[in-house]
Image: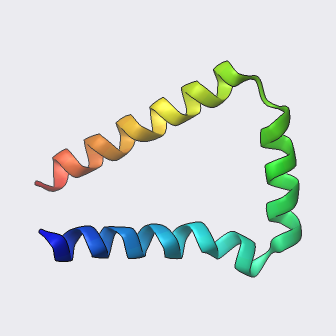
Amino acid sequence: MAQDLLTAFALVLIIEGFLPGVAPAAYQRMLSEVGQMRQRTLRVIGIVAMLAGALMLQSLN
């Protein structure tokens, strides 16, 4: 189980670091645009992402 958690965390770090590592200017623009979004919009995006991830995990097991 610990190995699975470390693998998942490593994948998160790789995915999260990809855009700022490859295209830092685009990453800054994206963060600026996210900062302009309404809190409700961000909340909906976050909840949809969590549900999609949970459904993907459920379908894999």
Q: Nearer the viewer, residue 41 or 35?
A: 35
The quadrant of the image that shows the C terminus is bottom left
Counting from the top left corner in percent of width and height, residue 46 is at 53, 35
Drawn side of residue 31 relative to residue 47, left or right: right
> Which residue of the protein is positioned furthest toward the front in this rendering?
2
Q: Residue at x 80, y 52 (%)?
A: 30
Left or right of residue 13: residue 7 = left
Q: Measuring 72% from the left and 79% from the top, which residue is drawn there?
A: 21
Q: Residue 22, how many percent across, how many down?
A: 74, 80
Q: Is residue 60 above or below residue 12?
A: above
Q: Is residue 41 above or below residue 27?
A: above
The quarter of the picture where residue 27 lies is bottom right
Residue 57 position, x and y percent, is 23, 51
Give the left or right position of residue 44, taking residue 4 as reference: right
Q: Quadrant of residue 16?
A: bottom right
**To which quarter of the image does residue 7 belong?**
bottom left
45 is higher (above) or lower (below) than 22: above
